[in-house]
Image (spheres, rainbow, N blue to C red):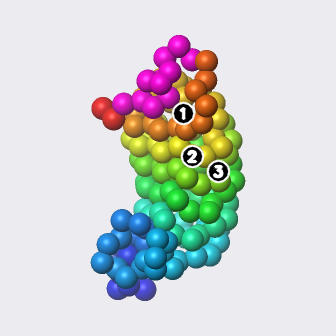
Amino acid sequence: MCEWAGVSCAGSRVTGLDFGAGSSGRGLTQGSKSWLSGDVGLLAGATALEEIDLSGTSVSGSVEPFAELTQLTILDLRSTDVSGSVEPLAALAQQLTRLSLYSTCVSGSVEPLAALTQLQELHLADTDVYGNATVLRAAGIRGTFLGGDAPSDPDWPSSYFGDAS
């Protein structure tokens, strides 16, 4: 399996899956979506995984089991059919540096994600995630992109869209 395109390994353990939209030259796309489909919950037991990019694929299922992947540094599921609450992902506080769930069916409050102190990028636009993103900014999380209606925050939009610095 470690010799397959899109699979990274350390020894015999699979540490990365890169089958996402940016996986050019791998022959994984068929039209606008990758041919890859299935329930992402099947990855919950793959505890050695550090990076997962399934963006633009036809995968589905809940994001909640990813909270069990304690080595995960990158989780990119943008433009997929995943759903569930983002709140359990706060369990990845010690290592997650990039979380991209925009254009998915995820939901829940953004506030618990402030625990993701290593996070450098957070993309939640076009989701049902709600809450005041100023808590993320106060936690030092930059590059935050949320969607939805403009709340009654006086710093709108800067407090919600952050800056990439």
* Residue 160 visible from this viewpoint: yes
Q: Residue 126 carries which label?
A: 2
**Residue 135 location (% of width, % of height):** 54, 25
Q: Which of 95 and 33 is in front in this view?
A: 33
Q: Which of 9 and 138 is in front in this view?
A: 138
| Residue at the spot 59% in from the left edge and 54% down from the top edge | 104
Q: Give the range drawn in magenta.
A: 153-163
The quadrant the N terminus occupies is: bottom left
Q: Nearer the viewer, residue 35 or 137?
A: 35
Q: Mark 1 points at which residue?
A: 114
**Residue 72 location (% of width, % of height):** 47, 57
Q: Inspect the image, locate mark 1, and give the three-letter code of the amino acid beneath it.
A: Ala
Q: In terms of sequence position, does the residue under pointer 3 or pointer 1 come before the other? A: 3
Q: Would you call the spot at circle 1 few (<14 residues within 10 Å), some (14-19), or many (20 or more)? A: many
Q: In this view, does 64 lie above or below 116?
A: below
1 inside magenta stretch: no
Alpha-carbon distance for marks 3 and 2?
9 Å
